[in-house]
Amino acid sequence: MKRYFKIFILFLFLLGAGFSFAQQGRDRVEALRVAFISKKLELTTSESEKLWPVYNEYNDKVKAIRKNLRHSYKAKAETMTEKDAEELYILELQSRQAETDIHKQYAGKIKNIIGVKKLAKLRIAEEEFKREVFKTIKEGGGD
């Protein structure tokens, strides 16, 4: 698996910055993530078919919250007033609460699909995947 990550990262660097290439790269990373996690959790075909649409919906909602927060900070960064800073502070707290609420909601759905033990292992597998990707990028970068 490590070899495939290295090849993949090299492939991304060689493709350049074009949008279609970037989208292909994201799709490839997503496919590697799904395969990695599915293998780590030892998902059955049935579990996998049910899990990934729910899990992707969860991720999309969390990403939307984070994207909104980032855009809010960027929009006010140059001309931030005390009032803007207070609004951003409140938005940050609301965003964290919204993420927590979504996590609770979807953890229940996911638990019903794969069980509590695999739900706990899911978090571990996500972190292992991130570490592998960062490690591969670091090794590929020559640092």
Image: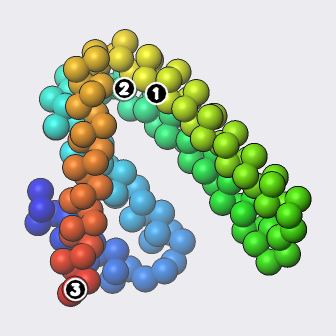
Mark 2 crowd level (few <14, some 14–19, many ≥20, 10 Å Cα): some
Amino acid type indicated by mark 2? Leu
x and y percent of residue 66 in the render?
Answer: 61, 50
Could you tell me which quadrant the N terminus lies in?
Answer: bottom left
Q: Quadrant of residue 125?
A: top left
Foreground disc of the pair 2, 3 = 3
Q: Earlier in the sequence, mark 1 or mark 3?
A: 1
Could you tell me which quadrant the C terminus lies in?
Answer: bottom left
Amino acid type indicated by mark 1? Val
x and y percent of residue 64 in the render?
Answer: 63, 46
- Identify the residue at horizontal 67%, vertical 48% (top origin): 92
x and y percent of residue 10 in the render?
Answer: 25, 77
Q: Quadrant of residue 130?
A: bottom left
Q: Dots 2 and 1: beta carbons under 8 Å?
A: yes
Residue wearing tag 1: 54
Mark 2 → mark 3, Cα distance in angstroms: 37 Å
Foreground disc of the pair 1, 3 = 3
Amino acid type indicated by mark 3? Asp
- Identify the residue at horizontal 56%, vertical 41% (top origin): 62
Residue wearing tag 2: 51
As displayed, is residue 25 above or below residue 42?
below
Q: 57 or 126: which is nearer to us? A: 126
As displayed, is residue 70 above or below residue 54?
below
Query: SS at mark 1?
Result: helix
Query: SS at mark 3?
Result: loop
Mark 2 → mark 1, Cα distance in angstroms: 5 Å
Residue wearing tag 3: 143
- Does the rendering let one see residue 122? yes
Mark 1 → mark 3, Cα distance in angstroms: 38 Å
The residue positioned farthest toward the front in the image shown: 82
- Identify the residue at horizontal 22%, vertical 49% (top origin): 128
